[in-house]
Image: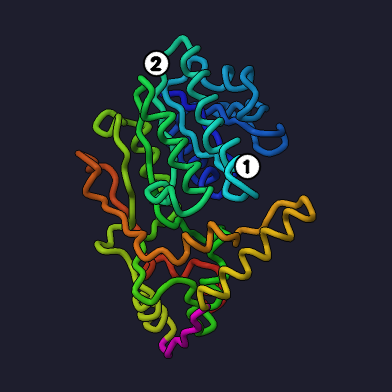
Amino acid sequence: MKSVALTGATGFIGRHVLELLLKRRFKVRALVRGIDQIGTGPDLTPIVGRLNQPDALNALVEGVDCLVHLAGATGGLDYADFARVNVAGVCSLLDACGQSSSSVRFIHLSSLAAREPDLSDYSASKRAGEECLTGSELNWVVLRPPAVYGPDDPALAPLWRALAKGWLIRTGPAQARFSLLHVRDLASGIVELVKDPAPSLGRVLELHDGRRGGYGWGDLKDIAQAALGKPIRELAIPSSALKTLGLYNLAVARLTGRRPPPLVPGKVRELVHHDWVCDNSQIPGRREWRPSMTLATALAQLPGWRDLG
């Protein structure tokens, strides 16, 4: 039985990964901020601490076979805000792995945004975090998923609810294409790498739902129209409006000292980027993992659509 150290266990993706790891009878140590954030069990041990606390990280990774690092910062005022987690967090975990008495395999969940580090502070921090790991001597694999969605994801819920009401809210250029990945397929891919990561060690891998060439906005409209049985109307949000709102959100956050909402100028640049298509062909010898859900098969489970049933 393999033992796994896990960060980000209480997040959207982490909850699914933790559930599957326990279902497959791995022994899991999960880094949490408070003991009440997570349950306990014979195969689950919570480690209370944060990514900037060496003692907690040493306890997390000591003696484990594999480290799955999911925790990340998705919001911030500037690069420093993102880097405290997305860069320094990776470096701190590397230090802890270096002090461990065992040989720890490091599986790092990055983002497809790291492919374009000049777009935003977030994407730059994700690339820098990758470079901390890829420059190390550990056995590592970096995963770059595209937009990850699922029934319990709050980020894309407004898009699915609008589609269920007959509206496609387009926030990117008409010609843009993008890949998608259901959270359960991402979780199963991560667990397969935990089981037998050797074929992919030392690689940066992209994952998607198996749809070659990804999706366009027209594809989303066609899929929703087929499911609803009626036409979908399209509402395009001008990039100028998105940029103005992003600047406003950032200015208010700086004035009030509050955490900014997701839509800031960097996120706008990511939204209007034309190419977020992944390539699954980079995954060598991965017969055990096949994505099982496309948007067409998952749509009925998403927010707004469940109510239609």
Residue drawn at x 52%, y 16% as measured from the top left: 62
Other residues around mark 1 within 10 Å, as few (<14) / some (14–19) / many (≥20): some
Which residue in the structure is indicated by mark 1?
A: 81
Badge 1 amino acid: Asp
Residue 236 is a magenta residue:
yes
User: Where does the image place residue 245, in percent across and percent down from the top left?
Assistant: 63, 69
Which residue in the structure is indicated by mark 2?
A: 103
Badge 2 amino acid: Ser
Residue 255 is a magenta residue:
no
Q: Which residues are magenta?
A: 229-237
| Residue 177 visible in the current orientation | yes
Residue drawn at x 24%, y 32% as measured from the top left: 199
**Outermost residue toward the bottom?**
230
User: Where does the image place residue 265, in percent across and percent down from the top left?
Assistant: 57, 60
Seen in the image, is 89 located left or right of residue 208?
right
Above or below, 228 against 209 in this view is below
| Residue 8 visible in the current orientation | no
Seen in the image, is 78 located left or right of residue 280?
right
